[in-house]
Amino acid sequence: MNLKVIGMLISLSGAALMSINDSIFSFIGMICLIVGIYTANKGNDSQTLKIDKWKAVAFIISACIVSALVYKFWNVNNRILMFILQILCLSLLFSKDRNNGEKELFIAQRWNVYHVATIILIFNVMTYVMVYIAKAVKNETVNLDVAMFMWTVYAILMAVLVLVVFKFAFKVDIGLEILGFNRNGLSKKAILMGAIPSILLSAPFIAYSIISGETFRIQQVTRYDFLILLAFLVVVIIPVMESCFWRGICYSPFRKKFGPAMAITINAILYASVSAINGGEFLVYLFPGLLFCYLYERTENMYTNISASCIYSLIALVFR
C-alpha cells in the first residue's frame, strides 16, 4: 500500500470523525484530513509539494491558533472548525501547478485561488442566511410565504452576484462551454450517467426511510404552492448553482496542482464544509461531493453533473 492510498484512507477516517457532533472528535478529524491530504500528496508520482521555511512556521502558528479556537468556541456546532478547514484547503492552492489540466476542458479553465475563495465566501453567506430564515420560520417570526420567496430570490441573487464579481472584479466571463455545457452533451445517456449513481448513493437512506415508516415526508406538506416553490429551489436552482460553481470553477485549480484523485477529495471536503457550516452533518455532504466531482472528471459534462445533483436533491427532499 503506497502513501497515496494511505493518505486517502486517513482523509476518509478524518471525515468520519468530523461528522460526530463533538468538538474533540471534530478537531481530531480535521487533523486527520490535513495529514491525509499531505500524505497522499507525498505519494504522488509527480513533483512533491515544496514548503518554504516561512510556510512551515506559519503552519505551526496556525495549528496553535486552531487549538486555542477549538477550546474557546467549544459550543459553536463546529462552525469555527469548518471555517478553518476551508482556509487550510484554500492554502493548498498557493502551491505550483503540476500539470496543465491534462483534459481539454480543464486546460481551458483558468480559475485560481481567488475565484475559489470567492465561491466559498458567497456560499457561506448564502447558507447562513437560508438557515437563519429557516429558524425564523420555525420560531414563527417570519411568514412561510415570505420565507420561501426570500429563499428563492436570495439564491438567484447570489448566483447573479457570482457572475457580477467574476465579470467586473476578475475581468472574466463564465461561458457555458468553459463550465462543461457541451453542445452535444445533453443526451439520455448523459442524464442516466448522473441519475443512476445518485440513486445508488441514496439507497441507504431510502431503505432507512422505508423500514422506519417515514417515507414520503413531503406528503406532510399540505400547501401545494409551498411545495412547488420548495421543489423548484431545492431540486433545480441550488443543484444547478452548486454544479456550475463547485465543479465548474472550484475543481480544476486543485486538479492542476494535485491530480484528479486528490482534487476530487479536496473539492468534496470544501463542499461538505460549506454545506455543514450551519449544523449539517459533514459526512452526509462529503460522499455526494465525491460522487459529483468524480462524474465531472470522468465525463467532462456539466449536464451529467446537474442530473446527478438534481436527482440526489429530489430523493433527499422526499425521503429525508
Image (cartoon, helix red, strand yellow):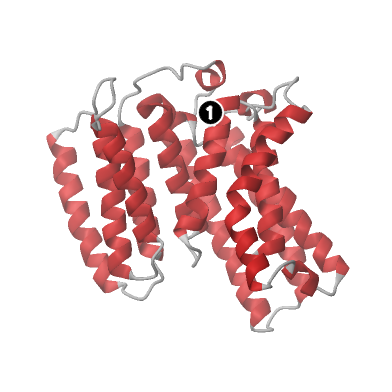
Can the viewer see residue 117? yes
Q: Position of residue 247 (x, y in %)?
A: 55, 36
Left or right of 281, for residue 141: right
Q: Nearer the viewer, residue 275 or 36?
A: 36
Of 68 and 28, nearer the camera is 28
Work out which residue is located at the far right of the displayed protein and give it.
224
x%, y% of residue 221? Answer: 79, 73
How many labels sit on residues?
Answer: 1
According to the picture, the residue beneath numbered tag 1 turns out to be 297
Q: Residue furthest bottom?
A: 140
Residue drawn at the location 35% of the way across and 23% of the way down: 97
Q: Residues within 10 Å of mark 1 (few under 14, many from 20)?
A: many
- Residue at left offset 64%, top offset 36%: 305
| Residue visible at 80% across and 61% down in the picture | 229
Q: Position of residue 53 (x, y in %)?
A: 12, 36
Up-down relation of residue 224 to residue 297 (above or below): below
* Quadrant placement of the C terminus: bottom right
In the displayed structure image, the side of residue 73 where residue 107 appears, left or right: right
For the N terminus, the quadrant is top left
Q: Give amino acid for label 1.
A: Glu
In what element is the residue under mark 1?
helix
Classify 204 as above or below 294: below
Residue 241 shown left or right of residue 89 in the figure = right
**Residue at 54 percent of width and 51 percent of height:** 122
Residue 161 visible at all: no
Which quadrant holds residue 231? Answer: bottom right
Relative image position of residue 294 (x, y in whole percent)? 52, 34
- Considering depth in this image, is 224 or 89 the residue closer to the camera? 224
